[in-house]
Image (spheres, rainbow, N blue to C red):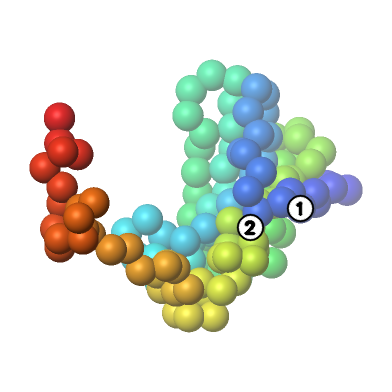
Amino acid sequence: MIEIVTLNAHDPVPDGGRHVVVLRRFDEEDPHKIVTQILLTHRKGPPETAQLAMDFQGIIAAAAEVAKEEGIGVVQVIDRTAGPRERDILQHGGDHTVHMDRLDDDDMEGERGPDMRDRS
């Protein structure tokens, strides 16, 4: 039986050996989209990745099959969308700017725009 271990949302992807990892995250190209991948890490070189058109639980089951075939007893699951900030982003349709303080672009004298003294 393959053990499924859920790591915290901001834990690093395991390295230094052979691991099967399910990584759920926001898409880099479209932050409104969620991507889930199976990673098979090796001692050397980049991990092999697979992105399947399945639900989250289906991908975890597929990762367990990969682990079984590879002789690895544990599947590690990292849901990068599961932290409190990430849940807030999901509730607002992937908008990463939600509840952020507005940044004011002014110089030390209160003039709008960048300050020439900040440039080097």
Decide: few, some or many residues near mark 2? Use Cα within 10 Å; few <14, some 14-19, many ≥20.
Answer: many
| Residue 5 shows up from this direction | yes
Residue drawn at 66 percent across, 43 percent down: 11
- On the image, the x and y values in percent for residue 22 come to 63, 51
Image quadrant holding the C terminus, namely top left
Mark 2, residue position: 79
Q: Position of residue 57 (x, y in %)?
A: 69, 67
Hey, what amino acid is under mark 1?
A: Thr
Of 40 and 98, nearer the camera is 98
Mark 2 residue element: strand
- In the rendered image, residue 67, in percent from the top left (x then y), is placed at 72, 42
Image quarter for residue 87?
bottom right
**Can you name the residue that lies furthest to the right here?**
1
What's the residue at 15%, 60% (across, down)? 111
Left or right of 17, for residue 92:
left
The correct choice, above or below, for 1 with respect to 60 in the image is above
Where does label 1 land, which residue?
A: 6
Query: Seen from this angle, which residue lies furthest bottom?
Result: 92
User: Residue at horizontal 69%, vertical 58%?
Assistant: 60
Question: Is disc 1 placed on a helix, strand or loop?
Answer: strand
Q: Nearer the viewer, residue 60 or 81?
A: 81
Residue 92 relative to residue 65: left or right: left
Tell me which numbered mark, 1 or 2, is placed earlier along the sequence: 1
Identify whether 86 is placed above or below 62: below
Which residue is nearer to you in this view: 19 or 99?
99
As drawn, the label of residue 51 is none
How much space separates mark 1 and mark 2, taking CA atoms? Answer: 8 Å
Whether pointer 1 and pointer 2 mark residues with C-beta atoms closer than 8 Å, the reply is yes
Q: Is residue 23 above or below residue 73?
A: below
Spot the residue most to the front: 109
Give the x, y percent position of residue 107: 20, 53
